[in-house]
Amino acid sequence: MLKTSPERADRPVLDLEAIRAQFPILTAKLDERPLIYLDSAASTQQPECVIEAVADYHRGHHANIHRGAYRLSRTATRLYEEARERVARFLNAAEPVECLFTRGTTESINLVAASWGRATLQPGDEILVSTLEHHSNLVPWQMVAESRGVRLRAIPIDDAGELDLDAYRRLLSPRTRLVAVNQVSNALGTINPVAEIIAEAHAAGVLVLIDGAQWVAHGPTDVQALDADFYAFSGHKLYGPTGIGVLYGKRRLLESMPPYQGGGDMIERVTFERTTYAGLPNRFEAGTPHISGAVGLAAAIDWVESIGLTAIAAHERALLRQATERLAAIPGLRIKGTARHKSSIISWVMEDPPIATLDIGTALDLRGICIRTGHHCCQPLMDRLGVTATARASFGVYNRPDEVEALAEALSEIRDEALRRMVRAQSEEIDSDLRYPAAVADSPQAAADAIAEVFELLPDWPMRHQHLIDLGDRLPPMPESLKTEANAVHGCQSQVYIAMRVRPGTADVIEFLADSDANIVRGLIAVLQQLYSGQRARDILAFDVAAFFSRIGLDQHLSLTRRNGLEAMVRRVRRQAETLVGG
Ligand SMILES: *Cc1c(COP(=O)(O)O)cnc(C)c1O
């Protein structure tokens, strides 16, 4: 897998094409655009050998573990326990029983919060997290803190996205019971000095949990050298399957902790009066586990180590350097997160002209480029950065420099398009009268038929997308005075406002104005207005809007649930209609 570059014989480089060839999803099909996958921080793709290991287990070795008297079950048990040994070597754990299989990082942290937290924490105790945490390393602590009268405190960051270690030292106190921080921020890419954080905590007699979800695929991990008390990660960010992850815990801690879930496999002896629990690791693995997931995870670890984490890190560093240089050169683009030590994650916003991150993500998708937009499950961090969302590209071992180049070029194009549209909008006369849109047809169904007719004339998604953007451009303006908190709809990726009224002189005709910072959402608003505005409450309630969105193919390209606020708008209009019909 390694070859030596002729120019720089001292530095191993990856044989990128050989690596890419192992990922079926990256192998371009002849008549389709190749996939440019820049979202490995959300989930990595899986190489053939991982897919095969899982399939091979299902084809030839599957049985329930730990209980069968027959050979097949013993084989499955052996494969599962060998996977645990593989994980232990990967983390350099002292013994395999310190590595518990879970569903992933989220469950690993919940396990510690529920088991260790409930057994240990007392009112007045404190838990330290950081401003960089994923909701997975925040909400479980809030839940246990609330039930125990424990205070959660956050280590602040500076404007570059680095933890303020002086503040951390000041926050450590005799009340602190646990420090829970990530090794790498999934939103900004900051690599945190976890060895130092752990040493400081231990000096104060405090335990440390490290969320390693964004680290393990990007550099070597040694839980003993770190002296981490708990360490969590997920298989699906390490080129392995979903639904499998690991919680490492020091033996003496795990042994002192009560079970997390009750059920089969975690007991020693059960009577109706009382149950005694099994030892490690079974005590924490109630029920039938994800056996094929563990097998796949072991295969993924083998694969990653066959390439070498040092070589992977060097390759990803080069991609990050290139991406940082190229994106920083785009006028109006601001990179969020400029820590000195960063993993292969780059986050940004478009400020001038302002382009909603949802529009960036949708426009890149049209070019076959997958990135992540939104708050990245880090809302407190977004608040600290003063944004509601960022766009984020993240790189894995299989990414190529030309993909970074394609991203930068696409972003420049998207910016140029936004500038042209701005000029057009300014030159058009804007009707400043506050006018609620009247009905465009006799009923929502008749309006739907007319809209569908137009959509059906547009053969593919790029054309339909453009049509939506054009509809958004012609959306009647919503006065700033109506953009109030009461009119805000909380979609998770864009700001949406909707102002509704009953048409004067009528009892049940609903009209509304709405607006969004995202152009694609403005297009959806225009469609919604054509369907609903000026219609009678009863007709609105009778109309099946979900079926309509699937009829025009929107559901295949846009998440119509919480992401863009569309569903929330529909719900508001229907609720208003219900009150009119009910009253
Ligand atoms: C992805 C991620 C999580 C959650 O991982 P799951 O696999 O969804 O459980 C937690 N923390 C960080 C830093 C992450 O990137």
Image (cartoon, rainbow, N blue to C red):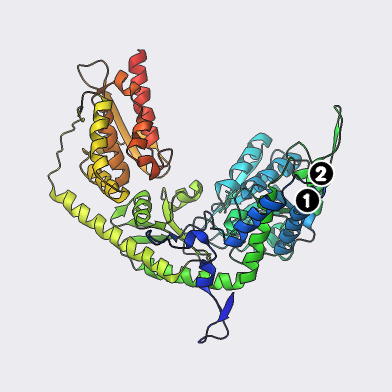
Q: x%, y% of residue 97?
A: 79, 54
Image quarter hosting the C terminus? top left
Image quarter hosting the N terminus? bottom right
Give residue 349's quadrant in the image.
bottom left
Q: x%, y% of residue 260?
A: 73, 40
Residue occupying the point 36% across, 56% down: 364
Asked if the residue under mark 1 is in contact with the one under mark 2, i.e. CB atoms within 8 Å, the reply is yes
Q: For disc 1, does the CB lie below 8 Å from ligand 1?
A: no
Q: Residues within 10 Å of mark 2 (few under 14, many from 20)?
A: some
Dot 1 amino acid type: Thr
Q: Is residue 260 visible?
A: yes
Q: x%, y% of residue 307?
A: 61, 71
Q: Which mark is residue 68?
A: 2
Q: Nearer the viewer, residue 484 or 410?
A: 410
146 shown above or below 309: above
Dot 2 amino acid type: Gly
Give residue 332's quadrant in the image.
bottom left
